[in-house]
Amino acid sequence: MKNVLIVVDMQKDFVNGALGTPEAQAIVPAVETYLQNAASDTEILFTRDTHSEDYPTTREGRHLPVPHCIRDTDGWQIIPELLPYAEKAQIIDKPTFGSVALMEKLTKENEACPINNITLIGLCTDICVISNAMLLKAAMPETDITVVEACCAGVTPESHRNALESMKMCQIEVV
């Protein structure tokens, strides 16, 4: 049995860039500490929200008309505080909120060697964290899925709390 830690979208645009918030900036030390304290046998994965130049013409871009995380721009990069960890981990680029590639990767790994726990931290609780947690829970209902509240931030404090409550209702542990 193994443990997996997923660091969701800790990118410049979500922390202090185009869509940055004070709440996102505030969790950076906690996320860094969580990564420092991760067990040596924990598989660490990073997701990276990834859009192309045509973002404004996409469905998401029409509903969220703020260009962000455009591939190879500064805002697309993982924040400097977490780069040492990201450089040692696999980074999964995802074109939308939840990553089917991440879910398929972990489902396959779980079949080969059961995963004891998948922990998610990062941004945004109410969009990408919840989307990935729900995908993983649906694909691996017998695997413990955990979200670390102090290492997540939402678009607003209220939507952060609502997302945590929704995940609890779906048997995702919030610690």
Image: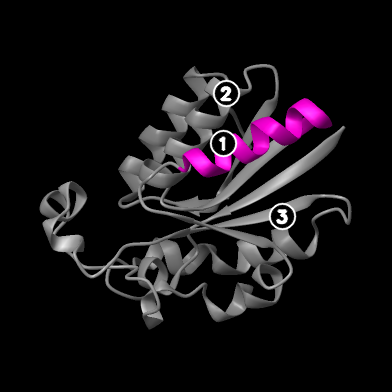
Quarter placement of the C terminus = top right
The residues colored magenta run 99-116
Dominant SS type (magenta)? helix
Q: Are marks 3 and 1 in contact (CB under 8 Å)?
A: no
Q: In the drawing, does residue 171 fall left or right of residue 142? A: left
Quarter placement of the N terminus = top right
Q: Are marks 1 and 2 in contact (CB under 8 Å)?
A: yes
Where is residue 3 shown, x and y percent of the image?
79, 40
Instruction: Name the mark on residue 174.
Output: none
Task: Say which element carries label 1.
Answer: helix
First in sequence, mark 3 or 1: give its number: 3
Q: Nearer the viewer, residue 117 or 157?
A: 117
Between label 3 and label 1, give the one nearer the viewer.
1
Which amino acid is tagged 2? Ala
- Residue at 42%, 26% (x, y): give it: 166
First in sequence, mark 2 or 3: give its number: 3
Is residue 74 positioned above or below 163 on the image? below
Q: Nearer the viewer, residue 59 or 159?
A: 59
Which residue is disc 2 drawn over? 139
Crowding near the residue tagged with mark 3, few <14, some 14–19, many ≥20 C-alpha atoms within 10 Å: many
- Residue at 64%, 31% (x, y): give it: 145
Alpha-carbon distance for marks 1 and 2?
7 Å
Which amino acid is tagged 1? Met
Q: Are marks 2 and 3 in contact (CB under 8 Å)?
A: no
Where is residue 153 shown, x and y percent of the image?
44, 53
- Residue at 41%, 69% (x, y): give it: 15
Which residue is disc 1 drawn over? 103
Instruction: Name the mark on residue 44.
Output: 3
